Image (spheres, grey):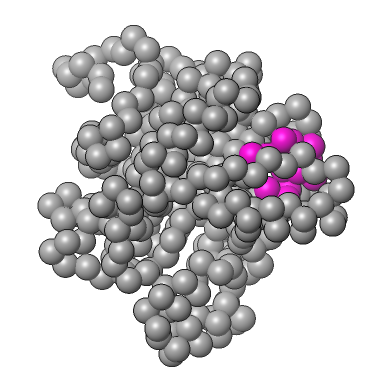
């Protein structure tokens, strides 16, 4: 694959895009790139104030950026529902949904709905958001895409369905890896269900940024009060990480490149898949386990109360479609 950059990103005039976690890090860079290419970007942010600060920064280099900041706290299913309903009241089309926001390796906390924070925000919040917006994606003319941000650390992940929320045993990195594996399993199962329902215009794609220098790495050490871990993270960012702008390229490629198909996995193709230009890759063996993906989907619907409406569904393996 050639070295795909923002110069290769197709024009986005007339398109509407949602980016979660749009006010900082990878989400900020993804938002800025879409704005530069002419899209209307709805910035789904936990803090509207920080979202507005991001708008000011983006407009310094993209004066005509069409940006709409809205509150969306992925740690609250009610906030996700309200955001989605308000979006559908104001917009008739959705061309790209970037499920980008996330938390990483934080001390155990719970969302407003009682989910372990990393699993709740990184997976369940985005699962609910996508489900609420599926009808708009499907009804939008032409091809639409849902791009879910995972991590190379999903390879470490295992789905512990007996203790999904780390109530019996909790390790912050294991919880993060589980949530990132859930992102990949979700994206692949979503793609399979779209195919089964013969919904051809909606693509589900998954990506990872490699090792990108963002504020994400700082939050865990800061919340745990570990000065040593914070220092180590800063040193690793300085030596190993690529910029957030470079780390945003896999998501932008997955969201806009013409040769992307549903069910593909995109990441940087350089050193140990941690940096470099985006390319199509293979995710972990666990991420292709259909049985695990089906179980995760069922559990996710049960926990969030969000059931995807795929319309008339054919039977799958002798069972009625969910």
Percent coordinates x, y for residue 221 in the rendering:
43, 79
Front residue of 293 and 90: 90
Residue 81 left/right relative to 302: right
Tell me the quarter of the image containing the C terminus.
top left
**Residue 9 in view (yes/no):** no
Name the residue at the bottom extreme.
Answer: 228
Q: Residue at 27% of width from left, 52% of height from top? A: 115
Q: Residue at 69% of width from left, 53% of height from top? A: 52
Percent coordinates x, y for residue 239 in the rendering:
60, 82
Percent coordinates x, y for residue 79 in the rendering:
44, 41
Percent coordinates x, y for residue 200 in the rendering:
50, 18
Name the residue at the top extreme.
Answer: 312
Task: Identify whether 82 is placed above or below 249.
Answer: above
Residue 255 left/right relative to 282: right
Residue range in magenta is 31-42
Task: Identify whether 245 is placed above or below 183.
Answer: below
Front residue of 256 and 19: 19
Q: Is residue 41 magenta?
A: yes
Residue 171 left/right relative to 99: left
Q: Which quadrant would residue 271 be assigned to in this image?
A: bottom right
Q: Residue at 77% of width from left, 39% of height from top? A: 66
**Residue 106 in view (yes/no):** yes
Q: Is residue 140 magenta?
A: no
Tell me how many marks there are.
Answer: 0
Task: Identify whether 229 is placed above or below 86.
Answer: below
Task: Identify whether 168 is placed above or below 204.
Answer: below
């Amino acid at each position: 694959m050639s070295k795909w950059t923002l110069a290769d990103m197709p024009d986005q005039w007339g398109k509407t895009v949602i980016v979660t976690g749009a006010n900082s890090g990878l989400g900020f860079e993804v938002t800025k790139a879409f704005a530069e290419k002419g899209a209307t970007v709805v910035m789904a942010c936990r803090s509207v104030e920080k979202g507005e600060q991001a708008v000011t920064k983006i407009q310094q280099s993209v004066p005509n950026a069409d940006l709409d900041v809205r509150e969306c706290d992925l740690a609250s299913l009610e906030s996700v529902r309200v955001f989605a309903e308000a979006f559908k009241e104001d917009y008739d089309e959705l061309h790209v949904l970037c499920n980008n926001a996330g938390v990483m390796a934080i001390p155990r906390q719970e969302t407003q709905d009682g989910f372990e924070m990393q699993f709740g925000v990184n997976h369940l919040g985005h699962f609910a958001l996508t489900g609420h917006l599926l009808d708009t994606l499907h009804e939008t003319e032409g091809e639409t895409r849902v791009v879910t941000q995972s991590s190379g650390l999903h390879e470490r992940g295992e789905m512990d369905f007996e203790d999904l929320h780390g109530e019996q045993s909790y390790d912050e990195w294991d919880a993060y890896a589980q949530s990132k594996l859930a992102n990949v399993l979700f994206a692949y199962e979503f793609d399979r269900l779209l195919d089964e329902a013969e919904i051809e215009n909606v693509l589900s794609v998954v990506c990872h940024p490699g090792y990108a220098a963002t504020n994400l790495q700082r939050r865990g050490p800061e919340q745990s009060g570990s000065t040593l871990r914070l220092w180590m993270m800063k040193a690793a960012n300085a030596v190993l990480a690529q910029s957030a702008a470079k780390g945003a390229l896999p998501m932008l490629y997955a969201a806009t490149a013409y040769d992307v198909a549903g069910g593909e996995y995109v990441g940087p193709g350089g050193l140990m898949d941690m940096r470099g230009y985006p390319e199509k890759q293979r995710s972990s063996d666990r991420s292709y386990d259909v049985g695990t993906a089906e179980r995760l989907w069922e559990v996710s619907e049960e926990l969030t109360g969000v059931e995807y409406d795929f319309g008339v569904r054919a039977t799958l393996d002798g069972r009625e479609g969910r």
